[in-house]
Image (tube, coloured by chain):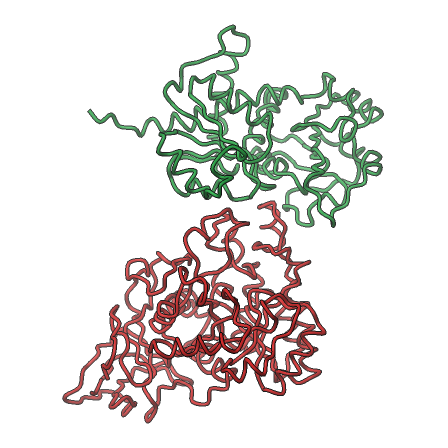
Amino acid sequence: MKFLIKGAEVWEENIRKQLDILIEDGFIKELGEGITNKNTRVIDANGCVALPLFVDLHCHLRTPGEEHKENLETGLGAALKGGFHTVVAMPNTKPPIDKPELVRYLIDAAAKLDKADLKVAGAITENLQGKRRTSLESLFLAGASAASDDGYAVNNTGLLLESFKEAAILDMPIFLHEEDYELSNRSGINEGRVSFEAGVFGNHPLSEALPAARDILLARQVGARVHIQHVSSKETVDVLKMLKFKNITAEATPHHLIFDESATLSLNPLYKTNPPLRSKEDREAILEAVKSGLIDCIATDHAPHTVEDKSLPYEDALSGMAWFELVFPAIYTYLVLKELLSPGDLVRLLTINPCRILKISKRPRISVGERANIAIFDVSTKKSLEKIGSKSKASNNPLFSTELFGFTKAVFKDGKLRFLEETFLEGEEN
Amino acid sequence: MRHLITVKDLSLEDVNAIFMLADSFYEQIDSRPIKKVPLLTGKTVALLFSEPSTRTRVSFELAAKRLSADTVTITQSTSSMKKGETLEDTARTLSQYGIDLLVIRHSKAGAPDIISSLGLFPVVNAGDGKRSHPTQALLDAYTIYREYGKIKGLKVAIIGDILHSRVARSNFEILRMFGCRIFVLGPTSMIPSYLPEDVVRLENIEQAIEECDLLYFLRIQFERFNEREVVDIDTYRRKYALTRERFEKIKKRDLRIMHPGPVNRGIEIDSEAVDSEFSLVFKQVKFGLYVRMGILAYLLSERSEEIEVPY
């Protein structure tokens, strides 16, 4: 089977050009202008952009234990539709992924699905309680790609140091949710104007920056690879400026890049995230760090919740936004169209650097001879996810019913056409 | 459909309309033997209170009754909320009974917004967490207007536990709306580290007495203090309380003093001041009833215009 993608603007590292893409037997055979070829299935991609598939270092698939929020099929399906080749699931499930058999269970279950590929982060501490270390070696041997207690912070420095030593020997990256609970007050509202007006305890920006600084120093001591998750404050950006070295990487979420604390003034629980949305200046600092490379990648922190979990008073509502299918439309509409990020930035932030951090040697790449791992997004029509229909079980994103440019037109993964215009292609269309 | 969740939901025109209604209810009812007007006959006002309250709950209930509306009161300890029913489901249930307006007090900021976003009926916030208490701010402004004949341009000092006070937050908003100059004074531990730009922090109470037109004392909300928040009564008394000696200066300057109640007598204000002619504390309570009648009438009469008679 041959496919000809006609008319899309190809976005690759150092490429931004309207090019036709000829795919034969799952590989990119030709890349050029005005390609014609008989006996091919033509995908009209005028008004679209084509990017290499993305890799997400940070998502929550709620499996096992909370499958009413998301299961592997819906989560990985939504990821694939959103243009993701591979996603890393965080271990804060019920029970948490703190044992090798749970890692294996997830990897095996995902392998049967043929949606986006799954990689698993195993827990740093038992039951994510920050008290007893897990065996990172066992988790690693079972297939865990990283270690994380995401959702919870580990603030026992002696324990962290031991885990860092073990991870350094295994060359296993540690993904850290940084939060000093005494400073964050476990609050979903930034400290300052908004926490004053809401009359709630605020989440101080140093609640993230202080443990980040501590952990970078610890990592430097033992040579561990540490990845700072969901950077939310300019203070944390400053810490990265001062202390970052080659083993340290960091991510920013779409919500911290697109929104700021003013959205939380209404106390609409859809804007509640952890860490919280912070000031305009924080958002600007994160954008600048993402541009400059100080923050390495964009990770979604896809956090599906039920409507009920998000219909509680702000303080009680659960944190997080469901992102997979909205990542490209939101980033395109709010950041690329406003020239805050360039097409090249997106490839670097969503594909190249996440692959580097996971040490994926063959990244998705739009280049002759490569397997087709291509996402095609329609940037000339505005649609809403609510109208298109979501593959995820969750709709907890403030942009769920907003009209945006850039929803998915087609997805080729590992050589196969897997998604075309709002229909999933099951099985063997290759 | 109009809601009153924070003062920001109202324009100056809205506030003036509510005050005019309060004026007329006051004249029609206060000195009359029959304390009822038939304005809201056939309407039902539900009161959902999940936090203790005396004056707010009683005055809302009486306000509804004096407007001839039916009332139903739900408190947390006797309702299905205790069985784990969500706020949304409680609201939907009340909606099935055809209630026309809900007054809600809740310990969590943002709880009224959850219900108002359903669009079932107008929602009036009677206090949510430490965030907002718009009807208190309205009755305070109305009391000032009755007493001073104007609000605009007055210099108002709000004194005491600003940190835990939804009354202070809402008063900032309404006083700002009327172009007042707002001052605050209190122990460092009771002043939020963030203050709106137009709010000026005073050094001492003497400054407030000398420079302001009105002193608004807040209750120290002992129940809201956590282990990091300090309250030292001796220092408070010495520096920020309205003691007998300070009251003499207030009398000389003919200032008025206000307090949202309940008063910790002998802590924020000495009894002599509370009970004096310079105190508006009980006028606030009285006017609170008429302002709340005005609020109910304003929100419900607007709604009635939308109702079409089916045949």
Give the colour of chain B.
Answer: green
In this orientation, which residue lies closer to the viewer: A167 or A414?
A167
- The furthest residue to the front: A101
In this orientation, which residue lies closer to the viewer: A346 or B237?
B237
- Tell me which chain appears red: A
* Residue A10 placement: quadrant: bottom left
Image position, residue B55 (x, y; %) = 59, 25
The relative height of residue B5 versus residue A428 in the rendered view (above or below) is: above
The relative height of residue A296 versus residue B257 in the rendered view (above or below) is: below
Q: Residue at x 60, y 23 (%)?
A: B143
Residue A117 visible to an observer of this rendering:
yes
In this orientation, which residue lies closer to the viewer: B53 or A231?
B53
Q: Residue at x 50, y 38 (%)?
A: B5
Q: How many marks?
A: 0
The relative height of residue B125 versus residue A267 in the rendered view (above or below) is: above
Residue A346 visible to an observer of this rendering:
no
Q: Quadrant of the N terminus of chain A?
A: bottom left
Image position, residue A424 (x, y; %) = 26, 72
Q: Residue at x 68, y 82 (%)?
A: A220
Image position, residue A21 (x, y; %) = 27, 86
Q: Quadrant of the C terminus of chain A?
A: bottom left
Image position, residue A48 (x, y; %) = 29, 74
Q: Is residue A32 left or right of residue B229?
A: left
Q: Residue at x 27, y 91 (%)?
A: A30
The relative height of residue A279 versus residue B224 in the rendered view (above or below) is: below
